[in-house]
Image (cartoon, rainbow, N blue to C red):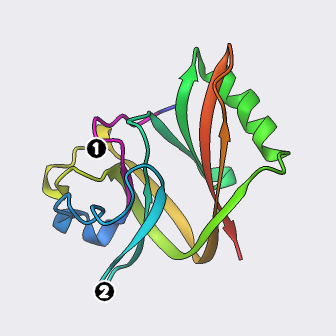
Amino acid sequence: MRRLETDFGLYALCPDSYVADWNGTEADATAADSVGKVVLPGHGEVLTLGGEPLPIAFLQDIMTFVRWVAADDDQEVERAVEAAAGSVDWQDLFEIALGGRYTLLDSATNGSEVEEPEVFHVGIPEGRYRVQSLEIPPSDDAGFKFDRLVSV
């Protein structure tokens, strides 16, 4: 499973149409330790995923971002995804309007300096989504943070 890494700890789901103009400060108003959103005039809302500088992946089929707190291998992710799917502990955070092609990037990166191995391209169907979070605390084997988009 391909993951992104950051030294900063905050990722942004930036509309592709804005990436070249992204200057790395747009997400400064969001809390660096939580999931948030910012509005880019003329480009809509941007989802930010904060916290420690953890590796992140996007699972397109279940519209879920996964951040590694601790894990030995990707098999741990599969088990955690299964556990998360059946969990009643998901926390509703807020709603956000999304739709189109996005680039998931380190929010502190200047868009003109973005290189392909350092980003993910994500397609999100047009609509409103409830953002939900769940943390699977570190155990002997693994720990993960999940943030998912649920169509409303």
Above or below: residue 105 compared with residue 16: above
Q: Earlier in the sequence, mark 2 or mark 1?
A: 2
Near mark 2 (Cα within 10 A), the count class, few <14, some 14-19 or many ≥20, is few
Q: Secondary structure at mark 1?
A: helix
Above or below: residue 52 compared with residue 75: below
Task: Name the residue located 63 percent from the left edge and 25 percent from the top edge.
Answer: 138
Whole-percent x, y for residue 151 in the image: 69, 71
Whole-percent x, y for residue 109 in the image: 21, 50
Q: Which residues are magenta?
A: 3-13
Q: CA distance from mark 2 to mark 1?
A: 25 Å
Whole-percent x, y for residue 87 in the image: 82, 46
Task: Name the residue located 16 percent from the left edge and 62 percent from the top edge.
Answer: 23
The three-letter code of the residue at mark 1 reads Glu
Which quadrant of the figure contains the C terminus?
A: bottom right
Q: Nearer the viewer, mark 2 or mark 1?
A: 2
Whole-percent x, y for residue 6 in the image: 32, 37
Query: Looking at the image, which is closer to me, 93 or 77?
Result: 93
For residue 30, what is the image quadrant?
bottom left
Near mark 1 (Cα within 10 A), the count class, few <14, some 14-19 or many ≥20, is few
For residue 77, what is the image quadrant?
top right
Label for residue 116? 1
In the image: residue 103, left or right of residue 122: left
Residue 6 in magenta? yes
Above or below: residue 152 compared with residue 90: below
Tell me which secondary structure the magenta stretch mostly adopts. Answer: loop
Label for residue 42? 2
The three-letter code of the residue at mark 2 reads Gly
